[in-house]
Amino acid sequence: MRYIIGNWKSNQNLTESLIWLDDMISLVPRLPSDIQVILCLPFTDIASFNEKLAETNYPLSTGAQNVSHLPPGKHTGEITAMMLRELVSFCLVGHSERRRDFGETCEEVAQKAKSLLENSVTPIVCLDQPYLDEQIKTLFQFDVDVKRCFFVYEPFSAIGTGKPVDPVAANHIAHQVDFLIDANVPILYGGSVTADNAPDFVRQNQIDGLLVGTDSLRPSLFAAIINSLQ
Ligand code: PEP
């Protein structure tokens, strides 16, 4: 199985998200059975997007882009894993933009992953070299069941810059993650993925799929990435 995960970040309101889905269904009426496509949307879009997915029977999975590291309680504005469990099967944690803009730590990322797993949501743990070892070590310290997580190597220099890293170098890091996790889990690459370079990444023996930011926003570009892998 291959995985293509879209990350819309803070883009697309509800109306736009439903138009995106209509366009996607007309561009790729049948998603390939050997590729699981997961879309990580803003919280505000998820419920209605899911309803439309159910009406259309379109086999795309939805994910969130963040979750609170805190349990349910007096934390105004926080979205907990318990709330997400009714809405999504996946959730990104530890994206480098959150570390940079919100000072997210390896401990918070581990708490998020743990609370997602307690609520049957699969954490998609984003990693970059400066904190890769520390993040994985912290997951083990917090008793996170890493066998139930996805991992993505996302070099910061490649995110949104149009400058992907060399696929062979990305594969090397994916092997390092595989070694540290020591379990058969999906390991993906993310950073300036396009339909032109996608096949070069998934051709690598340790890369199971792709996390796509910019090119997930336009259905034609996202569809082209999916089609490029067939
Ligand atoms: C991302 O931020 O998760 C990402 C991969 O972005 P982009 O595809 O725009 O580099």
Image (cartoon, rainbow, N blue to C red):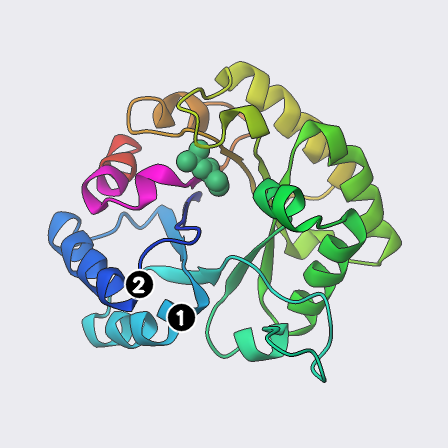
Magenta stretch contains residue 148 = no
Range shown magenta: 210-223
Real-space Cα separation, disc 1 to disc 2, in angstroms: 7 Å
Which amino acid lies under the numbered mark 1 shown in the image of this protein? Answer: Thr
83 or 33, which lies in front? 83
Which element type, helix, strand or loop, lies under badge 1? helix
Residue 174 image point, x, y percent: 62, 29
- Tally of marks: 2
**Badge 2: few (under 14), some or many (20 or more) residues near its Cα, within 10 Å?**
few
Which residue is at a point 41% across and 41% down the rendered structure image? Answer: 213
Q: Quadrant of the N terminus?
A: top left
The residue labelled by disc 1 is 44
24 or 45, which lies in front? 45
Quadrant location, ligand no. 1: top left
Which residue is at a point 17% across and 56% down the rendered structure image? Answer: 25
Which residue is at a point 50% across and 37% down the rendered structure image? Answer: 208
Q: Are marks 1 and 2 in contact (CB under 8 Å)?
A: yes
The residue labelled by disc 2 is 13
Which residue is at a point 69% across and 72% down the rendered structure image? Answer: 118
Residue 26 image point, x, y percent: 11, 54
Which amino acid lies under the numbered mark 2 shown in the image of this protein? Answer: Asn
Q: Quadrant of the C terminus?
A: top left
Residue 10 image point, x, y percent: 42, 54
The quarter holding residue 132 reads: top right
